[in-house]
Image (cartoon, helix red, strand yellow):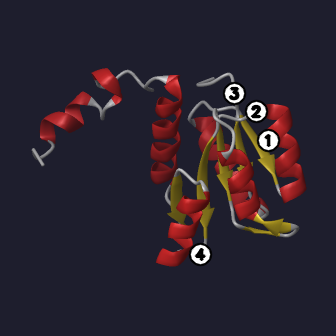
Amino acid sequence: MKSDRPILVLEDDPDVGNTFLAMLRRDGWNVSLAATLAEGYANLVGWDPCIVIVDLGLPDGSGMNMVRAAASRARTRVIVISGRGEEVDRVVGLEVGADDYISKPFSAREVNACVNTLHRRLGGGTHGPEAAPGGGPPAREMANSPPW
């Protein structure tokens, strides 16, 4: 496992939730899935996740409440993934406490990059044998990158 603390995914759509489970587990993460705000709060307290991925549209309340609750915890980072992709929605999500905001539809690669970046910021180190010193991009990518 990449962390002794799990990732909590708060997503009410079973297909999307199972996609997150498969994608994150394939990348070596311990993942807990919640479909309602109530389940999410219980998992936030019981599991002490390092990262919480939150969908905003939940059947029993606004995901923004979970963003606030999770962001108030010093050792927890928050990613919002939502179909609400307007600038105002993204800005509000970030101002409420999200560390990142990804609009649906999302790519697995983008989500994994966000998760790995936030984990590094929590002191979790880098992942994979090709990681550059200091937690930057893989060395082969740096060699081919423009200087800006």
**Is mark 2 in CB contact (under 8 Å) with mark 1?**
yes
Which numbered disc, 4 or 3, marks the residue that appears first in the sequence? 3
Please, what is the three-letter code of the amino acid marked with disc 3? Arg
Please, what is the three-letter code of the amino acid marked with disc 1? Leu
127 or 96, nearer to the observer? 96
Q: Do we see residue 86 in this rendering?
A: no
Kind of element beneath mark 2? loop
Residue carrying label 4 = 84
Residue carrying label 3 = 5
Instruction: Tell me the residue at 70%/46% (across/down).
Output: 70
Which numbered disc, 4 or 2, marks the residue that appears first in the sequence? 2
Residue carrying label 1 = 44
Q: From mark 4 to mark 3, how far is it between C-alphas?
A: 29 Å
Residue extending furthest toward the left = 147
Kind of element beneath mark 1? helix
Q: From mark 2 to mark 1, how far is it between C-alphas?
A: 5 Å
Instruction: Tell me the residue at 88%/50% (across/down).
Output: 39
Q: Do we see residue 143 in this rendering?
A: yes
In the rendering, at what x and y percent does residue 97 appear? Answer: 60, 54
Q: In this view, does 53 lie above or below 44?
A: below
**Residue 47 sits in which quadrant?**
top right
**Residue 95 sits in which quadrant?**
bottom right
Kind of element beneath mark 3? loop
Mark 3 crowd level (few <14, some 14–19, many ≥20, 10 Å Cα): some
Which numbered disc, 3 or 2, marks the residue that appears first in the sequence? 3
In the rendering, at what x and y percent does residue 99 appear? Answer: 53, 50
Residue carrying label 2 = 48
Mark 2 crowd level (few <14, some 14–19, many ≥20, 10 Å Cα): some
